[in-house]
Amino acid sequence: MTATPHMTAHQSAHQSAHLKAHRLSVAPMMDWTDRHCRVFHRLLAPEAMLFSEMVTADAIIHGDRDRLLMGHHTDQGDPVALQLGGSDPQKLAQAITLAAPYRYSEYNLNVGCPSDRVQSGRFGACLMAEPELVRDCMTAMITAAGDTPVTVKCRIGIDDMDPETGLDTFVETVARSGVRQFIIHARKAWLNGLSPKENRTIPPLDYDRVMRLRDKFRGLDISINGGINEREQAVALEQKFSGVMIGRAAYQTPYLLAQMSAAIYGHDVADRFAVAMAMADYADARHAEGVRLIAITRHMLGLMNGLPGAKAWRRALSEEARGEDADGEVIRAATSRLQDSLTSTENAA
Ligand SMILES: Cc1cc2nc3c(=O)[nH]c(=O)nc-3n(C[C@H](O)[C@H](O)[C@H](O)COP(=O)(O)O)c2cc1C
């Protein structure tokens, strides 16, 4: 989002905080980036923008909103973006109005997800072929969202769409709604024949295409996503774009997320033992509400990767966390054991 002369000082401060958060974001990932996962990621990346899993406009309108949307503000700290799925402008606007009390920091429209279920509902990546419809969705969302920023996440194209003219036309048309921020997953989605998982690996990554988009639309904020799995790479791309969005690498190797956050925002790398202990306290609080420990620890399994003893820690958090009675103590005990074994190895050396 680019500051304009019409903004109040309050609005432009709000925008620059939002842009700062977007320098590093954790991608929306179904079944993965749920509220427990976001609490964990917040400890690793205190200033980054964290995305929810996609929630469809219909689910928000007809479903159990507290279950779908709750929790983020008290537990996860700002900023968290709510990703919406849908293609009906009125429903998307209604979903935003209904979601407002949950105070997300941003609303994002999913124009990148290739699954069959999503295509039959006419949303996700297939919408790249309908830029005018996406523009109308964004116009309705921006009106409903008031001061809250609205963004788009898309691919560089779909199927046999020309990745040069197709993407330019898409972005140019959608930007007429007033949306200023695009997050581009730097590969096409191939809608026939590939599973969603294959669609995240087989279509080749093309960062240069996203670079040309950035050069052509200098007034827009373009973030890049896809295949970023090293700290130096994240730092280098963050300098070229408005931000980097990290998906699988952040989830599977959480400590890398902490390292990326430290490098991009210039703070100390989060101490992973302290993070584990904080999650133990969080798990106790959720346990008292009936949340199973495994629902929390399943997101943390990669935290100690690379340390000797990581395997035993991981095993404790996956196996001992399954029982109904298991609480934060499982995390505390496993973490202390790991710390003790590291200290005794150091002393022996
Ligand atoms: C398990 C999983 C679930 C995903 N769910 C969503 C989703 O709900 N919405 C979305 O826009 N993208 C979704 N994605 C795609 C990611 O947001 C991201 O664009 C993609 O994984 C590429 O980034 P990466 O290479 O850093 O993982 C999902 C990816 C994974 C691995």
Image (tube, rainbow, N blue to C red):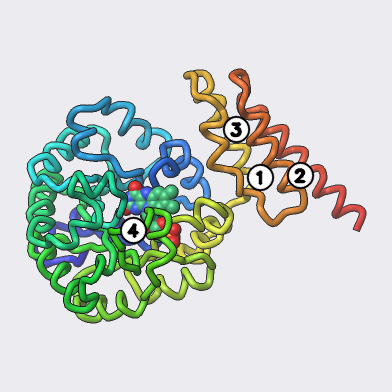
Dividing the image into four equal quarters, which quarter contains ligand 1? bottom left
SS of the residue under disc 2? helix
Q: Which mark is residue 183?
A: none
The mark nearer the N terminus, 2 or 1, is 1
In primary-sequence order, the first of circles 3 and 4 is 4
* Residue, disc 4: 193
In the rendered image, the vertical position of residue 74 relative to residue 264, given as above or below? above
Whether the residues at callouts 2 and 3 have beta carbons within 8 Å, the answer is: no
Q: Is residue 299 left or right of residue 34?
A: right
Q: Is residue 129 above or below residue 288?
A: below
Please rate how many residues cluster around mark 4, counting C-alpha atoms within 10 Å: few if below 14, some from 14 to 19, many from 20: few
- Are the residues flagged by discs 2 and 1 in contact, CB closer than 8 Å? yes
For the point 25% across and 81% down, the residue is 215
Residue that carries the numbered disc 2 in the rendered image? 339
The amino acid beneath tag 2 is: Gln
Q: Is residue 47 visible?
A: no
Task: Name the foreground residue: 324 vs 124.
Answer: 124
Whether the residue carrying mark 4 lies under 8 Å from ligand 1 is answered with no
Q: Residues within 10 Å of mark 2 (few under 14, many from 20)?
A: some
Residue on which the image places disc 3: 280
Element assignment for label 4:
loop
